[in-house]
Amino acid sequence: MVDRPTEKIVVNGVDTNNTKLVFPRKKDKENIVSIHTNARQIFGLQHKFYGALRDYYNNENSKFNPDALPNLLIVRSLFYNALLTYWYSVGLYQTKTNILVIPNWKEDEEVALYDVENTTSNYDPSNASHNYAPHSILSACFWILWKRHLGSHFSITVALPSEYSLLKHLYRTFDINVIECSKHYALGEDTYSGFTLLNPPHKFDVVQLIGHDRPEEGTVFRAEDIKNDFKRYCNDDFLLHDWWRPKGSFEQIKDLENQYHGIEGIQNESAIQSLDEIRAWTQSNQYSMQSHNNDNDDLNNLLKNMQVNDTVQNLSDNATMIFEKQKKVYIPIF
């Protein structure tokens, strides 16, 4: 339970002003620039995120109830999985600055803010046999909010079709730059078949594709061909990052091997090595918790409010498992 008096935020009896956290802002080779903050700032960000979701649910689309499952599980899942995407982006993109994000969000095809099909019906967080599955696309879309809050050097531009949507609402709430694209992007589709960006502000250093539909089994696309499709919008040495997560609960996907398919090519070794280094840095800082700077009982009480999926997993457990699996499952960068 979170209490929110004006002067402070108290979580499970812990004054969050007193809990110190550290996050990476920028990675330049072996040098990692970090920002020190406290848990109050993070829970305040989570509360603003929850409010924006509630506002959209109440005023725009009644399918997207952030309180559809107990204990703010949907909100916490989206919020803290987005932090994992932020960590990865800092590691992979290093000193790259201008990032173009193209999410695969087709609102009329969605039924909820989580993966209903792979979540146990009548989900009970106290039942260890129940599975909760986060939304495989939305769980990566909100890393930009962390970037905005923590002051990372990235300059983010999100490309969305013209219709108003949940993503457009959230990004505008957090002052994220959104430009229009002519239609939804489809993996492997070249720019000349109808997908274009309208008035991009500059050339981009990274194209991040989020959650795009996989091609039929046996069909693959060459990374160099897709990069050629985006070349007119990008600098010569830009990176293509195809961020994809299989559907299912973390329990269901944790043993998957080599499930990624879609784009083939030579991955960027510098980015992959940098990812390993940010992973090591993040682990050495106890996934931002810095236990040597905080009271262990306070941390344990806070972590109870930061569970992001099944009942036995908190932020650190979840991050450890995902860091181990993500490179094999959905980290291709070209």
Image (cartoon, grey):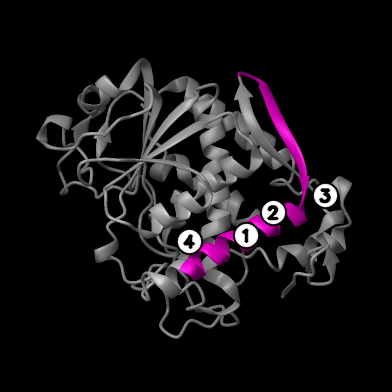
Between 89 and 311, the one nearer to me in the picture: 89
Percent across and percent down for residue 276 are 57, 31
Determine the CA span between mark 2 and mark 3: 17 Å
Q: Amino acid at mark 3?
A: Ser
> Residue tagged by mark 4?
250
Q: Specify the label residue 46 is tagged with.
A: 1
> Residue tagged by mark 2?
42
- Confirm whether the magenta stretch covers residue 51: yes
Q: Amino acid at mark 1?
A: Gln
Percent across and percent down for residue 207 are 36, 31
Determine the CA span between mark 2 and mark 1: 6 Å
Left or right: 180 as drawn, with respect to 218: right
Is disc 2 in contact with disc 3, using a CB cutoff of under 8 Å? no
Residue 123 against residue 196 in the figure, above or below: below
Give the extent of the magenta segment: 29-55
Between 255 and 223, the one nearer to me in the picture: 223
